[in-house]
Image (tube, helix red, strand yellow):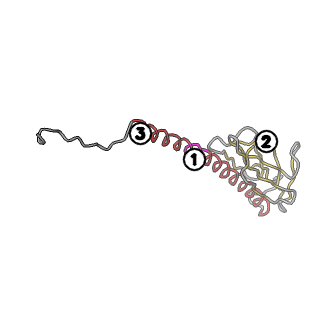
Amino acid sequence: MKNKLKIFTKHKAFTLIELLVVIAFISIMSAVVLTSYQSSRTKKAVETEARKVAAAVREAQNDALTGKGAGGCGGYVFTYTSGTGNYGIGGCLTANYTMINSVTFSNGGVFTFAAPWGNITSTAPLTLPATITVTKGSYCSNVVVNSAGNVTEGPIYSC
C-alpha cells in the first residue's frame, strides 16, 4: 500500500505578489536613474557652452592684444543675442558661433576690445562688468567680463 501513495513534495517558486514587488522596485529605480541622468546632461551642456563662450571672449581679447587682422579697424566686437544661441566676434576679424543642445543666452549685449591694448568698452544697455548668462531649462551659468578684461566662468546654478 505504501507504493500506491503519492508523495507530494513542495516545489519552490516565486509568487505573483513577489514578482510584482520586484518589477515595481526596478521600475521606480529606473525612473530615478533616468531623471538624474537627464539632469546631469543638461548641467553638462550649460557648462560646456559657457566655457565655449568664455573662450570666444578670450579669443577676441587676445586678437585685440596681438593686433591680429588689425588694419585700422575699430576693435574686436563681441556680440551675443538674447533668447538665441548665437554669438560672435566682429570688427577686425569675423567669427560666428552657435551653441548646441538648445542652450541659449538669457540676456544679450555688445562689448568691444580695442586694439592694441585690449581695453574693453560696452555698448548700452550693457554695463561693465558684463555678465553673460548661458541657460538651458532650469540651469544657468554666468561668464563675467570685468572692466579690466578679466574673464571668469561661474558655477552652474538653478535659475
User: Is 32 placed left or right of 26 in the picture?
Assistant: right
35 falls in the magenta region: yes
Are there few (<14), some (14-19), or many (20+) residues within 10 Å of tag 3? few
Contact check, label 3 and label 2, Cβ < 8 Å: no
**Residue 2 x %, y %:** 13, 42
Label placed on residue 6 = none
Q: Quadrant of the C terminus?
A: top right
User: Is 103 placed left or right of 146 in the picture?
Assistant: left
Alpha carbon of mark 3 to alpha carbon of mark 2: how far? 52 Å
Alpha carbon of mark 1 to alpha carbon of mark 2: how far? 28 Å
Choose between 44 and 120: the one closer to the eye.
44
User: Is 51 placed left or right of 2 in the picture?
Assistant: right
> In the rendered structure, which segment of residues is drawn in magenta?
32-38
Where is 26 relative to 152, above or below? above
- What amino acid is labelled 2 in the image? Asn
Alpha carbon of mark 3 to alpha carbon of mark 1: how far? 27 Å
Picture quadrant where residue 55 is located: bottom right
Q: Which residue is mark 1?
A: 37
Query: Mark 3 or 1, which is nearer the eye?
Result: 3
Who's the residue at 61% across and 49% down the image?
A: 40
- What amino acid is labelled 3 in the image? Leu
SS assignment at label 3: helix
Task: Please name the predominant secondary structure of the magenta segment in the image.
Answer: helix
Are there few (<14), some (14-19), or many (20+) residues within 10 Å of tag 2? some
Q: Which residue is mark 3?
A: 19
Q: Which residue is mark 2?
A: 107
